[in-house]
Amino acid sequence: MEELKQKIALFIDADNAPADKFEDVLSEVAKYGVVTIRKAYGNWKSPTLKPWEDLLHEYAIQPVQQYDLTKGKNASDIALVIDAMDVMYTRNIDVMCFVSSDCDFTPMVTRALAEGKVVLGFGERKTPSPFVNACSKFLFLDEEPKQNGTAQSKPKNLKFDTKLINLLRQAIEANEDDDGWAALGPVGSHISNKTSFDSRNYGFKKLSSLIKVIDLFELKRGPGNSYLVRDIRKKKPL
């Protein structure tokens, strides 16, 4: 019997998203299912959207024209939200995906989550945190800013990222055994259920690689060669 794939609706705020990263978006979205709706919003008369225009036919994206009727007001945002709401209530969609660096879609994301949808977000690092945190998962499309100094700068900065460290510690504590060890899989799931965390946003492909560079945690191989992680504060003295 063929496995049922989740259906995905993809909405692109072409005014506020980099076209050159669209393949990365599709690659990530493909992990969740099949994209049945692809729409991009913007004033297609504007030369700034030429990079997106070049992708429309190649990726079967439906362009939605919105003129800049009033200076300072983005009609594209409103049109996108109206269509997203319509799709959410009238189409059989499991995952809603928004490509934008604009926080105007935060209420839309919150509503979609309340309706039981998985919400994926993609944007640049300038994206306001309310939008990033509201999504089930948010992936930054631009490169992480380079750290100053030596190769040790990055781990050092992560070590003093209070929000990140607390997130990891709370997830470990929620899954640890009597000796403080927790399986990395459930730790990752706990974090994903809590926030839009993705280790790639910190420059690491895997959660284990991120944890390795922070000297506040221990990692070791457990059953089935899977990783176990422990807060170093729980390490018992010899």
Image (cartoon, grey):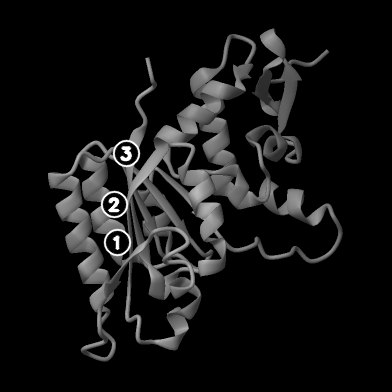
Mark 3 vs 2, N-terminal side: 3
Residue beneath disc 3: 7
Closer to us: 7 or 160: 7
Please report contact status of discs 3 and 2: CB closer than 8 Å, yes or no: no
Quadrant of the image occupied by residue 80: bottom left
Q: What element carries label 3?
A: strand
Residue beneath disc 2: 109
Mark 2 packing: few (<14 Cα in 10 Å), some, or many (20+)? many
Q: Please, is residue 47 above or below residue 96 in the view? A: below
Name the residue located 75 percent from the left edge and 48 percent from the top edge: 155
Q: In the rendered view, does 206 fall on the left or right side of 78?
A: right
| Quadrant location, the C terminus | top right
Q: Please, is residue 221 above or below residue 122 in the view? A: above
Marks 1 and 2, how far apart in space?
6 Å
Marks 1 and 3, how far apart in space?
21 Å
Q: Please, is residue 28 above or below residue 55 in the view? A: above
Q: What element carries label 1?
A: helix
Q: Residue 54 carries which label?
A: none
Quadrant of the image occupied by residue 226: top right
Residue 39 in view of the camera: yes
Q: In the rendered view, does 232 fall on the left or right side of 139?
A: right
Closer to us: 27 or 168: 27
Please report contact status of discs 1 and 2: CB closer than 8 Å, yes or no: yes
Q: What element carries label 2?
A: helix
Q: Where does residue 55 sit, x and y in percent of width and height?
A: 47, 67
Marks 3 and 2, how far apart in space?
17 Å
Residue beneath disc 1: 105
| Quadrant location, the N terminus | top left
Q: What residue type is labelled 1?
A: Phe
